[in-house]
Image (tube, coloured by chain):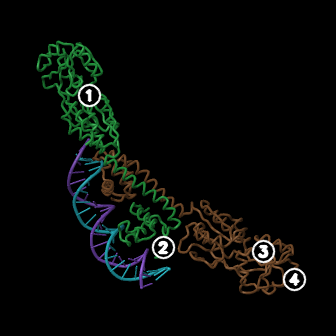
Chain colours: A brown, B green, C cyan, D purple
Amino acid sequence: MHDLSTRQLRAFVALAQERHFTRAAARCHVTQPAFSAIIQSLEAGVGARLFDRSTRSVELTPEGEVFGISASRLLAEFERAQSDIGDHLAQRQGHVSVGALPSLAAGWLPGILAQYRADYPGVGISLVDALADVCLDRVRSGELDFALAARRNDMTGLEGEFLYADKFYLVCPATHPLAKRRTIRPADLARWPLVHMTRNSSVRQRLEQVLPAAARAATFEVEHLATAIGLVRAGLGVSVMPAMTLFHAKAPELVVRPMAGAGFTRSLYLIKREGRSLSIAAQTLHDRMMAQREQIGRAESVLSASAQQPAS
Amino acid sequence: MHDLSTRQLRAFVALAQERHFTRAAARCHVTQPAFSAIIQSLEAGVGARLFDRSTRSVELTPEGEVFGISASRLLAEFERAQSDIGDHLAQRQGHVSVGALPSLAAGWLPGILAQYRADYPGVGISLVDALADVCLDRVRSGELDFALAARRNDMTGLEGEFLYADKFYLVCPATHPLAKRRTIRPADLARWPLVHMTRNSSVRQRLEQVLPAAARAATFEVEHLATAIGLVRAGLGVSVMPAMTLFHAKAPELVVRPMAGAGFTRSLYLIKREGRSLSIAAQTLHDRMMAQREQIGRAESVLSASAQQPAS
DNA sequence: CGATCTTACGGGATTCGTAAACATA
DNA sequence: TATGTTTACGAATCCCGTAAGATCG
């Protein structure tokens, strides 16, 4: 069974419309003898003469009419498939699904997404704000294109690219004794009630590794950052938060102090499926995130920048 | 813009299903390096990498998934179009429209059609029983594939192949004086009332050319053969009919006598559009008619033969 | 005789298969 | 090291364009 090509299909449609070899050949940008050969190869391929032709007239045979019904539709679908993927490549259409830790999803990420949306309005965006475990599981299943999260022990099937090392800061009331220090050492924390995030948050897991045992006892253990801030403002304790979430703690009665010590950082990664390439749209978004990684921790400036010039 | 071929499509679908170059190559009956080249040419054609591949795994990229949606459907339609025209070539489906003079349509043709229908039950048949002018106009317009009719003056755009020369016979009551003669000469007719067919019938037009003026006067002028026979049986006149219609005149009280003279024939043709080929189905039917042309004038034997063995 | 399709044929690109190189678990 | 994909490369094939041939009005 011969295999047909779009070239033959285009030639057929051109000849069926023009009913004239020379003109149809010109339309296909080939010489007339070459065009004849294409038609002949097509006829050989389908096993039937498709045109009744003399020097004076070119007409479809009955079999040609039958073939023509399929041919033009087929060609149209072919070109539609081609333009379809072209749209995806040009990011005129498509979809990106990205996961992110709630802290990133609330602060830094919206500015990136707004810029991307402005440049490629045809591409749909799904954002899953969830803790690292959920994000990574969904990346592994293919549900998400990639995620911004911390690494974890089981990274099989995943690969991560380093994004940002987020420094930890103490947040406490301005009236708190610790507010007088310029930097905070781990041991300082042991004497005060500590407001922790839930145990499966990446911040908490990092702190478990670096805090002295005395400071790891959870006085409070909350789900949401805003709750933690509220507790601190009420004077119920102090908390340790990564830099990028500090915009939550902007209040006159609160102060922020850097933690001293090498361990007080949380490394964030762009994590995707191992050995799999991202869609063009996802890759573009990925690259923009890498390019603007220094903005993390200054999330507000990113937000205001995007608000001032939403499109490039 | 590169042009895609079904070969590339088949390779893509095979690889998308097998997710393994060597196996997919085997399925496509090419060596694995050649198969790699096909995939690479396809990727170059659409302008995007469609598979993420290593020695250990072959997976679709996001763009590959997008392309795959179209590809399998496209390929299926391609092969469907091919099998569709194959069905027409094998006469498993299709349609033939044939026109015929009422005399042929009633007598000889049904046997031919029954045989053809038995051999190719998938092919629809339209039969238009009309006078020659209507038949030829519809052939010229393409409404009919071909027609069995007499030629006429204006045959532009038409071409006819000789089918049969139908002899004319006198039909009269057994008691009529002319019944005593073995053959009838034109002059004999002038003395008796003549039952004619309508003026635009081919029989009448032929008779106008060969009968002496005295016999051309129409005593009766009817539309239908059965009416003419009725008039003759009632003793109201005699009639002249072509051989193939004589089965209508089978009655004990009627006799049939050949007309003497070279002009007393009507030539019938298979008439189709000039320079246009017939569909396979129409051509087959056409050829069968040519092959069985000697059966015209013995219509009954054809009918009974087909009744005895309806299928081959 | 002019317009038009087909055949002939040489050159260049494409594609195939074999063999070697390369990559990954 | 074993499995599996890519690269290298010579040979066969395909396809194009030019030129000559054939056919119909």
Identify the amino acid type marked 4. Answer: Pro
Where is mark 3, residue-wise? A221
Cα–Cα span, label 2 and label 3: 44 Å
Q: Are marks 2 and 3 in contact (CB under 8 Å)?
A: no
Q: Could one spot residue B157 in this view of the protein?
A: no
Cα–Cα span, label 1 and label 2: 74 Å
Residue drawn at point x = 11 percent, y = 20 percent: B182
Q: Residues within 10 Å of mark 2 (few under 14, many from 20)?
A: few
Cα–Cα span, label 1 and label 3: 102 Å
Q: Chain of mark 1?
A: B
Residue drawn at point x = 68 percent, y = 69 percent: A130
Q: Are marks 1 and 4 in contact (CB under 8 Å)?
A: no
Cα–Cα span, label 4 and label 2: 59 Å
| Left or right of B88, for residue A185 | right
Where is mark 2, residue-wise? B57
Looking at this view, name the residue that lies furthest to the front.
B308
Percent position of residue A107, x then y: 72, 70
Where is mark 1, residue-wise? B103
Looking at this view, name the residue that lies furthest to the left.
B182
